[in-house]
Image: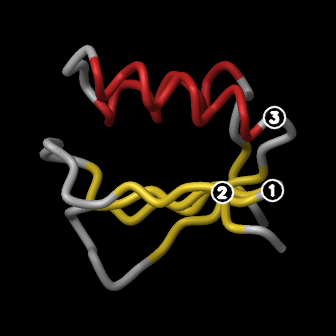
């Protein structure tokens, strides 16, 4: 499994880090930095680009994650 991107030290009150590989997105929230949440993602390139744009535009990372779940871009892994 090839690691695509890791985002840490985010200017976010909600999200501590985001790791993106070929088919998974792993998120650690500031509310519990000991727990990593895994999401399935069919298009990690699109997710990575949108996250990068969110960071560049200094928009809310938490809001982006939430909307990505609602839109089905990332799906909680069971």
Q: Earlier in the sequence, mark 3 or mark 2?
A: 2
Q: Earlier in the sequence, mark 1 or mark 3?
A: 1
Query: Residue at 45% of width from left, 56% of height from top?
Result: 18
User: Colour mode?
Assistant: secondary structure
Q: Locate residue 36 relative to residue 16 in the image: left or right.
A: right
Give the alpha-carbon distance from disc 3 to disc 2, as whole Å: 12 Å
Image quadrant assignment for residue 7: bottom left
Could you tell me which quadrant the C terminus lies in? bottom right
Give the alpha-carbon distance from disc 1 to disc 2, as whole Å: 7 Å
Numbered badge on residue 43: 3
Query: Residue at 48% of width from left, 74% of height from top?
Result: 36
On the image, numbered disc 1 is attached to which residue? 22
Badge 2 marks a residue whose secondary structure is: strand
Q: Nearer the viewer, mark 1 or mark 2?
A: 2
Residue 23, horizontal then vertical, whole percent: 82, 54
Q: Residues within 10 Å of mark 1 (few under 14, many from 20)?
A: some
All told, the count of numbered labels is 3
Residue 60 lies, with reference to residue 42, above or below; the image says above
Query: Residue at 73% of width from left, 40% of height from top?
Result: 44
Residue 21 lies, with reference to residue 12, above or below; the image says below
Q: Locate residue 1 relative to residue 68 in the image: left or right.
A: right
1 and 2 marks in contact (CB < 8 Å): yes
On the image, numbered disc 2 is attached to which residue? 4
Q: Residues within 10 Å of mark 2 (few under 14, many from 20)?
A: some
Residue 73, horizontal then vertical, whole percent: 71, 29
Q: Earlier in the sequence, mark 1 or mark 2?
A: 2
Q: Residues within 10 Å of mark 3 (few under 14, many from 20)?
A: few
Point out the residue furthest to the bottom here. Answer: 34
Q: Locate residue 70 relative to residue 15 in the image: left or right.
A: right
């Amino acid at each position: 499994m090839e690691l695509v991107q890791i985002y840490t030290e985010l200017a976010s009150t909600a999200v501590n880090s985001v790791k993106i590989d070929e088919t998974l997105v792993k998120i650690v929230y500031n509310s519990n930095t000991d727990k990593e949440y895994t999401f399935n993602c069919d298009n990690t390139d699109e997710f990575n680009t949108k996250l990068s744009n969110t960071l560049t535009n200094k928009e809310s990372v938490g809001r982006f994650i939430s909307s990505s779940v609602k839109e089905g871009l990332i799906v909680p892994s069971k």
